Image (cartoon, rainbow, N blue to C red):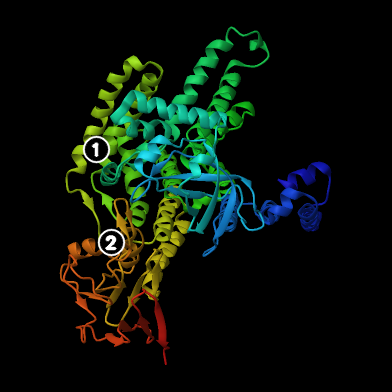
Amino acid sequence: MLKNYFYFLKIPANFLPPLRFFVLFLLTISAIFLRFHFPLFSKNSSLVALIISYCLMLIFIKNRLWRNLFIFTTVFIFSFYRAAVIFPPPDENFHCSGIWKITDFPRESLPFGEKFELSLIENHNSSICKITSSAKIIASDYRSREEIIEHSLQLGDIFRADLDLRAGDFAYFATLPQNFSENKTTVRPSFLLFWRNFLGQKIDKIFKEDARWVRGLLLGDTSKLSVYDREILTRTGTNHLLAVSGLHLALFTGFFYFLTLRIWAYSPFIYRIEPRTAAILTAVIAGLFFVFLTGAHTPVVRSWIMFSCLLISWLFSRSLTGIFPLFIAVILVLWCFPEALFSIGAWLSFLATAALILSSPYCKNFSPLMQWIFIQASLTLILYPIIWASFGGIAIFSFFVNFIVIPLLGFLILILFLALIFPILANFAIFSLDFYLKPLFVVSSWNVYFEPNYQPPNSAAVFFIFAIFFALCRYFRLSLINIFLSCICIILPFLQLDIYSAPSKIPSHIFYLNNRQTILLNTGYHLRQKYDYKRFLEPHFKRRNRRPTAIILTSSSTYAIGGVAEIKRKNPDIPIYTLSDLGDFAFEYEYCPSSVKIDEIKFTRNNGQCFAILELSNGRKVQINDKAQYQIISEHI
């Protein structure tokens, strides 16, 4: 294209390479100038690097495919950098005094009480409390049920409190003081939080016992779902039903589109602005309001960006169809919300949309029924790897369940919306909801959830899905490259047999010995949906095709024995050794035995304490005490 402009301007073609380097030099100088003279650029140095990368790409890369891949890779890499800035560093704790605001619906806290998401709106000791207003803070309220009911907290409430923040993987955690509710300020919440809270309360009032499902379907609020409800969604492969996404946005924006189209016909501005332009613009603005009303989760943000591309294509007569609007959505979401990289919901949303777009051309000549069967089968098969890698199991009947429930979801959402506006329809809406959920309850009662002994890494699943996408686009070389990268990601965990530590109040560790012997020190915490063994330890075993061959417990605390029942259910003969006397424990165990069947394990006593000495596969020896602390006592020779 540059050569065409050069020919039009009568500039010699041999001047093109020097001009590229000259432009690159000017852009670099401009980026350095912006870095030191404008606050936006000085606070976010990754923006400067991204601008320089884009300039390099635009100047030197001519192929559209490689150009788009370069943009995606660049934004992906710098999103990791920006996410590292947002997420708390490990072992970083603060004492913060300030004014806090509740930004999401309260959820059940375990073992009792509530927990909710906070944001810091006024920092009273910024020299000590070094967190930003965008930091995610999860606070637990352990007051009694009577106190919580008497002094309940709502979405948008503001209060003053002194909190001790503990750094987690992706957020800070805190425990609220007992008297914090006395410092609550009666301030009217923001417009969006007020309406989100208002709709939540109205749903509770109209739908009562079924309100937890309606909250999830209309607002994306899953805070009221029980462990049994979540298990039903997992076993049927329908977790996506409670993710507010494109279908919800299409119904909401479609209503405003057709309403504006009718009203504009009688408007005096009809000769100034074309009616469809006004209707699309109104729908986009209404859709943005809906995005924030439902919590601005990644699936609905992605849908709104893709819908906005429709407005751009209409206004500028450009065709923004196919995969390009999704590509724009990926870039904007990663740049604005880098934490979406670590959200399985975001991954599933984008991958499902890409699978839908890329597989649709292959069935365009089919009948409507066969098109739906083909698309649903394609989505199921393409998403199976990432679901298997993330959850460790596969819902076998998910294809048949989704084949039935997804086409009916739009009608159900419309009925629920109408019941909110006209409460006289509440009984009919409740009947429709029960009828809709019945297949889920029936299928979940069957033994149709398959959990293989092996679980692939998430990176391997993503590369494999990308290989399918490139094959659908007929880029077979890129497809083979992604299959190769997927195989590497599968092999790497088998080569990484070092000590693994899972986060818990009482640490849990995995030790790899010779002859495929694997020792588990403590099994994590377990109370209802909080299950450390399922979340951290079992995936680590499965990705190496291993099983624990022995368990060592340091105490009878719930933070140490939470996964024992699950392990004994799958492997009843596994021995349990302890470094302290557990008394009347539910399972048979040996306390500090003098000899065991595994040669690489030895127990010793010193000053009344029991220690375990393990000889690892790399030749090192470690000593473990009854505090779940290990120490390397002999290096590999």
Q: Residues within 10 Å of mark 1 (few under 14, many from 20)?
A: many
Element type at mark 2? loop
Instruction: Looking at the picture, tell me which residue is in the foreground, 16 or 331.
Output: 331
Element type at mark 1? helix
x then y, percent, for residue 201: 41, 28
Q: Earlier in the sequence, mark 2 or mark 1?
A: 1
Instruction: Looking at the picture, tell me which residue is in the foreground, 524 or 52.
Output: 524
x then y, percent, for residue 13: 79, 52
| Alpha-carbon span between mark 2 and mark 1 | 29 Å
Q: Which residue is mark 1?
A: 440
x then y, percent, for residue 223: 38, 40
Q: Residues within 10 Å of mark 2 (few under 14, many from 20)?
A: many
Residue 436 visible (yes or no): yes
Q: Is residue 629 above or below residue 82?
A: below
Q: Is residue 193 above or below residue 379?
A: above
Q: Is residue 156 above or below residue 394?
A: above
Seen from this angle, which residue lies furthest bottom? 637
Residue type at mark 1 is: Leu
Q: Which residue is mark 2?
A: 562
